Amino acid sequence: MINAIKEAARYINERTAGFSPEVGIILGTGLGGLVEKIEIEHSIPYAEIPGFPVSTVEGHSGRLIMGVLGGKKVVAMQGRFHYYEGYTAQQVVFPVRVMKFLGIKTLFVSNAAGSMNSTFRVGDVMVINDHINLIPNPLIGRNIDELGPRFPAMNDAYNPELIERATKIAEREGIKLQYGCYVALTGPTFETPKEYMWVKLIGGDAVGMSTAPEVIAARHMDIPVFGVSIITDTMENTSISHEEVQENGKLAEKNMTKLFTELLKTL
């Protein structure tokens, strides 16, 4: 695994003449529009990168974008990988591992999510302050000491300082933020009404099919993380489609893009 990670990073470095990103960004379903704000210097299809999986989900373009946003060099995944696509948990987080070897010091993650919190509305931006991971853990198996410790702590999976900065930015820019716990399920089915109730019962505010494994891998490598969920549906309306999720994601994309861009300026 470590050799494959290094090979992918080496290939990307060669393709980009050693472009060294400071921040990694993972864009969720229907949230790829942020890429339009990046001053793009390099764009590489996943299929051309050694060892990279290929995104099979509509709304995930499948390109690694490298450029400048908010005055910082960034590498953005326009489309992520999911356990439900048939990839192993280790394959799902492979790009995060590669980003580390490209030089990132911070990771931003986003996703489209359903909400169980009655105060949330479709189009809200929820800052993730904790998660409950019910997808197989990507650290299962032999630990690679070069990447991180056998038993990494997850008490600060979502960096408190970055959350505080984002809160101040949102107040200044007039962006309404929600805060809550994200629950990661395997998918690909959307939740039944009883599953929604159960996720709420165990402490969840939003639910989706990604993010937590990537955050676990990032924290394993001691990378600070800032994450948001875009609320695209609620437990009051469980008859949601993937197309509706993509469309509803666009409602908050502008606010998420502004928040990410301004937060980058503080790093």
Image (tube, rainbow, N blue to C red):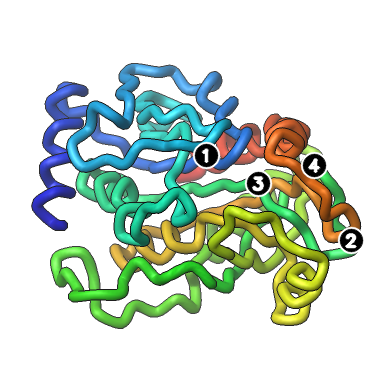
- x and y percent of residue 92 in the render? 37, 53
Mark sitting on residue 119? 2
Q: Quadrant of the N terminus?
A: bottom left
- Which amino acid type corresponds to the residue marked 2 in the rendered image? Thr
> Image point 16% across, 69% down: which residue?
144
Categorize mark 2 by other alpha carbons within 10 Å: few (<14), some (14-19), many (20+): few
Earlier sequence position, callout 1 versus callout 2:
1
What is the spatial separation of the Cα atoms under label 1 and label 2, in whole angstroms? 25 Å
* Image quarter of residue 204: bottom right
CB atoms at circles 4 and 1 under 8 Å apart? Answer: no
Placement of 92 over or under 130, stated as above or below: above
Residue toward you, 134 or 251: 134
Earlier sequence position, callout 4 versus callout 1:
1
> Image point 29% across, 45% down: which residue?
99
Name the residue tied to disc 3: 112
- In the image: residue 135, left or right of residue 153: right
Q: Is residue 255 visible?
A: no
Mark sitting on residue 27? 1
Name the residue tied to disc 4: 123
> Image point 86% across, 50% down: which residue?
121
What is the spatial separation of the Cα atoms under label 2 and label 3, in whole angstroms? 17 Å
What is the spatial separation of the Cα atoms under label 1 and label 3, in whole angstroms? 9 Å
